[in-house]
């Protein structure tokens, strides 16, 4: 599936293992929430087990229908989406998708989103100790739902509160996913670290919109949508650089990563792992290609571990 | 779910402008051709696009699939940058291809299929027509004018009955495909109506009219729908359309739907 | 110069005049600060007088050398810049560039940036009443200088304070240029409106960065730079939409506008005028093409004034 | 400032791969050809790029300009996506062209010019050489190996003395252009040194070595520099390089500079 195979002997020279707040992953290339379904949707196209982990589509306590169409719109080097967290709900996830993921042996991080602090807590409790759940990614940054989501992620106090409640409610590694739609992402990152997060992931999408000039109305059914893809990569990279220098927990870099070169930029900025989002939509095998390319690059340039890539001032 | 999809770089064998801005592309894609069923589509991206703008692949119906030769055909109109890039390709060049995707048309064994295509809607219907060898059935093809009636020869070779109509009367009947269909259905008795089923692809207003016609006449109807798509493969949930029970996803549950399952507003 | 010419009779059917807080411009297509020099640099390539106005490169009280190179880097559909406000200083501007602009009859908006509130005030005083200065654009959003700039623009209190001081110091129309690097741009916009701004312009660049993976260091001499160009258009459009609904003073839309269609989106979002930035760097005649395309579109679709384009809910 | 620049779509007349990955493009651009002086450059963007990625035009030196025919030539190496898109062009297609840009080389009337080019550095030097008809002068061209020595024929036709050198000795002298230049200058007496002037273009280490050589020998030296550029036309101030007194802008004050005005760190 991947384009070039590195032979095992060569590959054994480098250590791709990373530690995400206690969660040890074989390699640092993850699939981002909302762009890989629940794994099943991708399983015939790539070898999911060979990825560091998959972060499943955001789950809420109750199933959600999502936003009215149109939900997506292409922009220059980017994608606007306003899915609105359509998802099966935690019950269905536990009985259908999760068992499948566990059987396949796919490392699984569950992305959760609540309308209230209580809902976050409830979900953390329900997922705690479930076989197959390796960590939680707490989404406090979804720009496409009215309540919850980004509202929690744009304020250090409420971000910390959600983090603490989730952390106290379960014993899983907690990754908090940050919103880029803030004045000072380091302030939020520090508050969340302080509140007990084991790791941070960033960035979620940047709020944007498009207008259909012929119909004289917003393109998206939801008016606003989240911008992702290569267009936002420079912004994501800057935020990862800043946050990696402000906190001491691991940072997972997300935003426009489409090639192994992009991934290397994020590791150099200080990311411990990266997630591939929109690029998987464009080409489902992107993450495999990135993994292979990373290994190649590290071998050529004599890097032995992901940590060595980080630029240290 | 046991999906059998393939993500590959396909070799372009032919890419011919058969009418102004309408192209027929033939590619070699063995694996996809083996698994494809009529009504399914592929996501394509031109290898001439050297960058991220446009970013996404584009959905095109499988116009023809040959298990023997391993070849696929696409019939497409140049409307924007994605299809413009496809149109520039020469034989020997490559295209990124993901498929086969989505649900196909489902013709039941006892049914007499009536295929109804407007304009480019003929794209998935040729594959369907060719998958019905020796069966009784009708293909109704309509267009604005004669020169926009596409792919008549291969359609005729299927042995199905072909009815043609043009809005300006320059060829075949004068009028809309719905009028032809209406007449055809009205002439059937109730038993016969139970045996026919409509398989349709074309512009939304046409599909809506056909849906209402079939409702009135009590005839089963499948339609192939289009939406904007990001992944085409069920990953993003971007291709939702309202249906009877909540949203359906055109790339996953569709593009072919039982018309009465949808919300026609 | 422009690709198609609309004949005068046709064009007289539509009114392109806009009122930017008392400044009446013949048309709403402006050249953005930092991408058209002081006009001279562009005068042989387009007919500057036919543009609504030009916004000159940001001026500071003292001349500035700017940041060490590299200062620019191309990103997917975008441009990172870290010029660092290299400029001739207000004295030189007054004696050299301004007289030239006045002689040419080019409508001129002067973009000013201070390190302190006092510097903004001083500049406003010095520019007040000078022939050839049609308005001031107060830059509280430059991400590329250490002091001043963005620091003022990310806080409603200090943004209001700068606005008030400048407004009190002169009788020119005051346009305040907002930063997108904030959690709630409407909060800043309202504070600035309250403080007496006559108009708002947005957005300035979004803070970003890039890393050279072979040299293992940031590409830009200044580490961070501002992202501009088509990549940021969806974000700019969303902010213009939000701000135009939050304030009652005119809003000037900026960010990635490259074609007349893009400009129409901004007018529909509620902009009274637009500025063309990076697109001028790519093709110096972009603004002329946009003007012609706008007129064409308005004629075809029976719009008679810019105001009619706005989407009203 | 009385700039005379033109922003136009130029018709491509020829675009030939003269060596692997090295192309010679001839375009018709009457106005630019009339105003261009040696050492100036243009900003180019392929019309095959149908989108904003890559976004910016790319700077290329004017390799030749003919006032009579109104033609310009560019000599370029394919290094990334911008130049790759240019290389795909066929005659009859168009390229966006802005020029002539920047300062040119300035050869004083009494001077005996010595043109020194490494690799692609020959690009602006042919135009310079052709602008010196009947004058005494030397052209030193170096490359890694014989096949990378470019444009020898047209250079020879200028009537200037041509000295060739290759690093592997496969043609001409064996060694670097700086060694050839060093020998040449060392053989001159002080009077002669006052009369010669160096005009050089090539990789930065080569230019640095030439600068030091000229400093040591007391010879005037102009170099043509490269930086990343956004506008190429003085609008963005993005192309700054450190110089004796603050920054210079390669697209405006340059690309040709008196070497001793620059900061060579
Ligand atoms: C399942 C499916 C099968 C299809 N099969 C075929 C086919 O066999 N032949 C064929 O010619 N076309 C087919 N289409 C439509 C085709 O995908 C679009 O024409 C194409 O994506 C346009 O891409 P572009 O880059 O050329 O245009 P763009 O620049 O993306 O768009 C140009 C214009 O077309 C509109 N548009 C874009 N995508 C779609 C879409 N998916 N549906 C409707 N309008 C759209 C845009 O809003 C815009 O106005 C199919 C679509 C779907 C969803
Ligand atoms: C005034 C001037 C005149 C020039 N004349 C010529 C010429 O006559 N012939 C010729 O072949 N080249 C010339 N160059 C260099 C040429 O502009 C670059 O090779 C070209 O811009 C690369 O674009 P790309 O999209 O192909 O590569 P990109 O994808 O942009 O870059 C590929 C690699 O080249 C590097 N690069 C990009 N731009 C430059 C640059 N301006 N200088 C140095 N490295 C760069 C990048 O960092 C990257 O590593 C000139 C440059 C300048 C500034
Ligand atoms: C279609 C789509 C759906 C998404 N859904 C979710 C989601 O459910 N939960 C979440 O935390 N992030 C979601 N995201 C955000 C991505 O996980 C990622 O943070 C963002 O897209 C930036 O990365 P990218 O540029 O690589 O796509 C979604 C993104 C897209 C494009
Ligand atoms: C090279 C460059 C220099 C700029 N300099 C200034 C400046 O001096 N003052 C200012 O307010 N904005 C400056 N800007 C920001 C632009 O005016 C504009 O707000 C921004 O680039 C977004 O618009 P665009 O995408 O159309 O370029 C600069 C932008 C660029 C690209
Ligand atoms: S297009 Fe992504 S799920 Fe249908
Ligand atoms: S490249 Fe823009 S000023 Fe030189």
Image (cartoon, coloured by chain):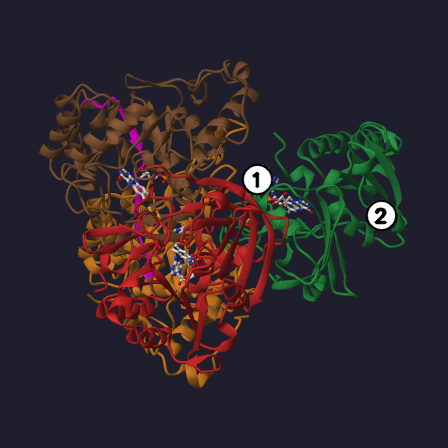
Chain colours: A brown, B red, C orange, D green
- Is label 1 in a helix, a strand or a loop? strand
Question: How many numbered circles are shown?
Answer: 2
Q: Which residues are magenta?
A: A196-211
Camera-near label (2 vs 1) is: 2
Q: Position of residue D116 (x, y in %)?
A: 78, 39
Which residue is situated farthest in the left direction here? A118
Q: Position of residue A115 (x, y in %)?
A: 13, 40
Reply yes or no: does residue A103 show up in magenta: no
Q: What separation in Å lies between label 2 and label 1 (alpha carbons)? A: 31 Å
Residue picked out by circle 1: D241
Q: Chain of mark 2?
A: D
Looking at the image, residue A226 lies above or below residue D212: below
Which residue is situated farthest in the bottom direction here? C9
Q: Residues within 10 Å of mark 1 (few under 14, many from 20)?
A: some
- Is label 2 in a helix, a strand or a loop? helix
- Residue pictured at 49% horizontal, 60% vertical: B76
- Quarter of the picture containing the C terminus of chain C is bottom left
Using the image as rendered, state which of residue B215 and residue C179 is in the foreground: B215
Q: Position of residue D12 (x, y in %)?
A: 69, 60
Looking at the image, residue C131 lies above or below residue A170: below
Using the image as rendered, state which of residue C69 and residue B240 is in the foreground: B240
Left or right: B108 as drawn, with respect to C290: left
Residue picked out by circle 2: D155
- Residue pictured at 85% horizontal, 36% vertical: D164
Q: Position of residue B62 (x, y in %)?
A: 46, 53
Q: Chain of mark 1?
A: D
Left or right: D182 as drawn, with respect to A217: right
Mark yes or no: residue D255 visible. Answer: yes
First along the sequence among labels 2 and 1 = 2
Q: Residues within 10 Å of mark 2 (few under 14, many from 20)?
A: many
Residue A103 occupies which quadrant of the picture? Answer: top left
The label on residue C278 is none
């Amino acid at each position: 599936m991947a384009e070039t195979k590195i032979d095992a002997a060569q590959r054994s020279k480098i250590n791709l293992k990373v530690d995400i707040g206690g969660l040890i992953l074989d390699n640092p290339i993850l699939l981002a929430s909302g762009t890989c379904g629940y794994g099943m949707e991708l399983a015939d196209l790539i070898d999911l087990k060979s990825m560091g982990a998959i972060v499943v589509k955001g789950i809420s306590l109750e199933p959600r229908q999502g936003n009215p169409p149109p939900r997506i719109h292409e922009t220059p080097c980017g994608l606007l989406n306003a899915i609105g967290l359509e998802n099966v709900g935690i019950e269905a996830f536990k009985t259908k998708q999760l068992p499948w993921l566990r059987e396949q042996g796919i490392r699984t991080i569950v992305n959760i989103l609540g309308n209230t602090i209580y809902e976050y807590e409830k979900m953390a409790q329900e997922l705690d100790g479930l076989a197959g759940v390796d960590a939680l990614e707490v989404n406090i940054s979804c720009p496409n739902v009215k309540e919850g989501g980004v509202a929690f992620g744009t304020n250090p106090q409420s971000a910390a509160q959600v983090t603490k409640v989730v952390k106290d409610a379960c014993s899983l590694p907690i990754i908090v996913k940050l919103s880029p739609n803030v004045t000072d992402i380091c302030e939020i990152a520090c508050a969340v670290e302080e509140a007990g997060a084991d790791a941070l992931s960033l960035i979620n999408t940047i709020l944007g919109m498009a207008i259909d000039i012929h119909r004289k109305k917003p393109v998206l059914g939801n008016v606003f949508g989240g911008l992702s893809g290569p267009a936002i990569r420079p912004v994501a990279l800057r935020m990862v650089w800043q946050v990696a220098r402000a906190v001491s927990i691991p940072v997972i870099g997300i935003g426009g990563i489409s090639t192994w070169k992009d991934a290397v930029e994020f590791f150099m900025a200080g990311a411990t792992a990266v997630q591939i989002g929109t690029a998987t939509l464009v080409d489902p095998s992107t993450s495999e290609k990135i993994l292979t390319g990373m290994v190649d690059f590290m071998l050529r340039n004599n890097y032995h571990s992901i940590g060595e890539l980080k630029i240290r001032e | 779910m046991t999906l059998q999809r393939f993500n590959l770089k396909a070799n372009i064998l032919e890419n011919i402008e058969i009418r102004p801005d309408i192209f027929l592309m033939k590619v070699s894609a063995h694996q996809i051709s083996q698994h494809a069923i009529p009504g399914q589509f592929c996501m394509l991206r031109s290898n001439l696009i050297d960058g991220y703008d446009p970013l996404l692949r584009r959905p095109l119906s499988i116009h023809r699939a040959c298990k023997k030769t391993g070849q696929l055909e696409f019939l497409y109109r140049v409307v924007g940058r994605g299809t413009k890039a496809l149109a520039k390709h020469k034989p020997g060049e490559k295209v990124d291809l993901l498929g086969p995707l989505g649900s196909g048309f489902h013709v039941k064994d006892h049914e007499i299929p009536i295929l109804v295509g407007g304009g480019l809607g003929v794209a998935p219907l040729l594959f369907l027509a060719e998958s019905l060898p020796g069966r009784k059935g009708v293909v109704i093809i309509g267009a604005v004018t004669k020169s926009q009636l596409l792919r008549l020869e291969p359609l005729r070779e299927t042995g199905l009955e072909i009815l043609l109509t043009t809005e300006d009367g320059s060829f075949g009947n004068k009028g809309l495909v719905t009028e032809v269909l209406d007449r055809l259905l009205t002439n059937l008795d109730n038993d016969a109506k139970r045996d026919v089923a409509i398989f349709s692809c074309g512009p939304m207003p046409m599909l809506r009219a056909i849906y209402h016609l079939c409702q009135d006449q009590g005839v089963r109807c499948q339609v192939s729908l289009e939406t904007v798509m990001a992944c085409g493969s069920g990953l993003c949930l971007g291709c939702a359309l309202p249906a009877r029970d909540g949203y359906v996803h055109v790339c996953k549950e569709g593009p072919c739907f039982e018309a009465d399952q949808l919300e026609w507003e």
